Amino acid sequence: MNWRGDAGAQIAASVSNGLRDVPDFPTPGVVFKDISPLLSDGATLAQCTSALAQQAEFAGAELVAGIEARGFLVAAGIAGRLSLGVIPVRKVGKLPPPTRRLNYQLEYGQAEIELPSLPLEGKRVYLADDVLATGGSVEAAAQLLTEAGALVVGVGLLVELEFLGGRQRLAQHEVFSLLRL
């Protein structure tokens, strides 16, 4: 198969081989991209975090933000390779106060995320997540970081579902996806 990704065909194939499709999860008609097999393969996980860390380093990142919950794992891997700190972007009610909150529109409803109240003014933050679908959560996280005074210097993803158009919602950010489906 002709695998495509922003880091090349070889890593795109590795990511693809580390995915498991789960039909009708979490709702009927949705095919969930489970990254658990990828996470359990140390060599592939190292390859992925290394490729994303190169992008974060190139962008001059000072911190890495991860979106709950699988994005935490991706962000921690990137940050660990670069000796940077991690910022959790979480569902409401999971962080101790004070926090910054943002309510945003999903394809089928609304959601709210929050960010710890940290001194982020002028900090260069690389935003990481596992899968980019419609882009709502990544767009909201980037907006929340920006409102906190951070400069989002890039978005790193394991997988991008191009047919859902998430990249278009993030046009103002440099998006780097290891596998583009």
Image (cartoon, rainbow, N blue to C red):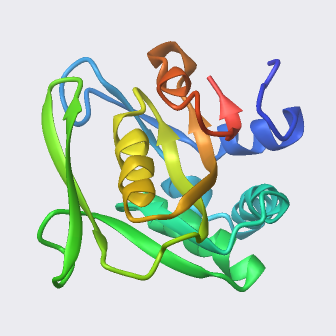
Which residue in the rendered view is the most extreme toward the top? 163
Q: Quadrant of the C terminus?
A: top right
Q: Position of residue 118 (x, y in %)?
A: 39, 81
Tally of marks: 0
Q: Quadrant of residue 85?
A: bottom right
In this orientation, which residue lies closer to the viewer: 76 or 114?
114
- Quarter of the figure that contains the N terminus: top right
Q: Percent position (x, y) of residue 135? A: 42, 32
Q: Residue at x 53, y 25 (%)?
A: 161
Q: Residue at x 69, y 63 (%)?
A: 45
- Give left or right: position of 181 versus 73: right
Quadrant in which residue 178 is drawn: top right
Q: Position of residue 175 (x, y in %)?
A: 65, 38
Q: Is residue 91 left or right of residue 38?
A: left
Tell me the residue at 65%/76% (across/down).
79
Q: Position of residue 97 (x, y in %)?
A: 16, 83
In this rendering, the answer to whether 96 lies above or below 71 is: below
Q: From the viewer's perspective, is residue 28 above or below residue 9?
A: above
Query: Would you place residue 35 above or below residue 33 in this image?
Result: below
Looking at the rendering, which quadrant does residue 61 occupy?
bottom right
Looking at the image, residue 68 sits to the left or right of residue 95; the answer is right
Between 35 and 123, the one nearer to me in the picture: 123
Residue drawn at (26%, 34%) of the image: 25
